[in-house]
Image (tube, rainbow, N blue to C red):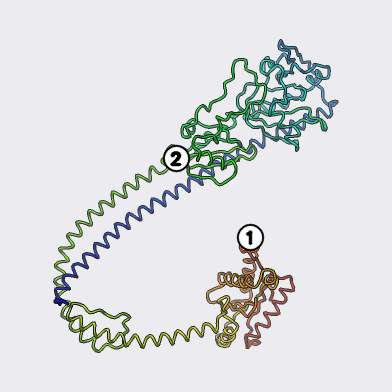
Amino acid sequence: MKKIILEKLIFKNYLKTSLTSILFIELALVILYFYVNNQMISKNIEFILGDIKKTTYTIVEKETKSIENKFLQIEKLATLLQNHQQNFFENPQNYSFANSIKFDKAENGMFYKLYNNGGSSVVVSKNTLITPSVKKKLHDTEGFDVLFKSIVDNNDSIVAAYFNSHDDINRYYPFIPNSFNAFPMDIKMENYNFYYEANLEHNPEKKAVWTDVYLDPAGQGWMLSSIVPIYNKDFLEGVTGLDVTINKFIRNILSIKIPYEGSSFVLGRDGKIVAMPKNVQEILHIKDIEAYTYGENEKIKTTIKKSDSFTILNHHDETIARNFENIINGKSYKHDIVVAGKEYLLFSKKIERTSWFIISLVSKEKILLSLRDLEKEYKNLGYLIIVFIVVFYLIFFLFLLQQARAFVSQINTPLKKIIKMTKHLGTKRETELLNTSSIVELDELCTNFNNLSQKLDKRTQKLIESETQRFINQELANTDALTGVYNRRFLHDFSEQYIQIVKRENTSFTLLLMDIDKFKNINDSYGHSVGDDVLKKLVEILKGLVRRNDVVVRLGGDEFVIVLPNTSIDNAKEVAHKIIDTFNDMLKNNHYKYPFTVSIGIAKFEHDKDNHIEDILAKADKALYQAKKNGRNGVSQ
């Protein structure tokens, strides 16, 4: 092997090592800078997205509660009408209408109310025979108009109130002039959802229910109704309803102020679009979601619901369609969707009474716009730092070259002295042998160190083996093999010295003795392996509840002792009750598949009575017996 002079080697490697280290540190700092910035941006994005989700849910939740409250109020009004009108049919003698109302027969054969007296319009199908009893009903039911007028005129959400009878009479407020032109001349109420959805088959509870969205025969466009059946005992006299137009009722939903210019729309329980603003139509590429335009002289003879062209489940993007399907079916859905290459956050909230879903969309691009600008500034700063490092590195190289020469001169002389000193070194262990090098002076140093290290290694190894075996034997003797806590032997050895210290220092301690309630039943029912698992779970929980200087001991079986140094009896009770409460919470909340409870007896060390640990254990055992006697799962002293 070729030998070289140490002075040259140190000079060369000093420069190499110093420059390499500086370069490595600077590169590491640059990498760390970009990594930290990237993490900061990611965390900010995560925080903002989380905040938007929370804020959006709060906003939509508030609006949903408002809508639910409106629905509830309308249902109460419908129920009020139901009670009034059922009482009318069951007790007609209690009702009369004094004013004379004029009716006539229209050219299309329908019987109708001629003039607006401030109440409802009335029209009768041409197929209904106008008998004296029918005329009397037409006259007497004018009494319905007082409540109809009060409800409609004083509630912005309700556009109309009506009563449709089993014999195809329609009473509708507000008054429709020439009402015979508004409906089919042979109108049959059973053909419309605002009638049949209230009958006994669809509504056996005879309560207020909401229809699906339908096209109003009276020309009000898309609407839904809160309808109630009107029974005369068990006979269905008709159905009364309160009409709510879609546009009027959900305009607040469409104008919800979602963060970052987000928008909301409404889906029905069948996936059909109840209402959707223009910008959402453009995002989802849905066309022709417009208000219905009635044809000239068009008559609605049966229930017309929104067509399948209004169904989001038919969306051309199958992934989006399935996601909305999961929302409607109450399944887990994706909160992040991609439409035409753009990412959006999606949120949903169900309106229980109508099974509608308020869906909100927020553009991720708008959310992250400000963060992207910040990320660009961080990167520009990082590039500036890199330029600075290059300049600094060149300057530092010149400085280091000068320092290297001085360093070599300083280290070479004392190194020769170190060689002589190592010949007499014999007390410090060297874990690894030094390899010989191409440096003459270091070869001798390595040889001396290697000889010394071998001798020290042998001595140290023997000492380590001896101490290790002693430690293992001591731990095995004092530790419970199953639970890892101290055993009865340790308690007796420890207590002998500890009680002497307590008496000498005039301090005290308290002892908790506990066992698992009906532990035998656990072993009998699930086997001893489950019993062992229960004991381990007990120790795991106890360690989390006691202090570091408290001593947990397994006496045997399911009996455990906790020694609480410098603890009064009252504080010991608090610890015991804390343990009891913890296991009760575990039992209540099913946090563990084999729930159990414990009973605890408490005993305090008394200087003038207790000399051995068995004295205190005897008192604690009596207290434990009392806790068992009191019904288990409790504490006694």
Residue 244, position in %: x, y? 63, 29
Q: Going by the image, does 34 lie left or right of 158?
A: left
Residue 131, position in %: x, y? 82, 17
Nearest the eye: 526 or 130: 526
Q: Going by the image, does 367 lie left or right of 508?
A: left
Residue 186, position in %: x, y? 72, 18
> Residue at left 18%, top 67%?
15
Identify the residue under disc 1.
589
Q: Quadrant of residue 607?
A: bottom right
Residue 162 in view here: yes
Q: Going by the image, does 170 lie left or right of 284?
A: right
Nearest the eye: 596 or 300: 300
Q: Quadrant of residue 306?
A: top right
Mark 2 lies on a secondary structure that is: strand
Q: Is residue 384 above or below residue 272?
A: below
Residue 259, position in %: x, y? 47, 41
Q: Is residue 64 above or below residue 534?
A: above
- Local packing at callout 1 (Cα closer than 10 Å; few below 14, some 14-19, many 20+) is few
Circle 1: residue type: Asn
Residue 566 in view here: no
Mark number for residue 23? none
Circle 2: residue type: Ser
- Labels 2 and 1: the sequence-earlier one: 2
Mark number for residue 363? 2
Mark 1 lies on a secondary structure that is: loop
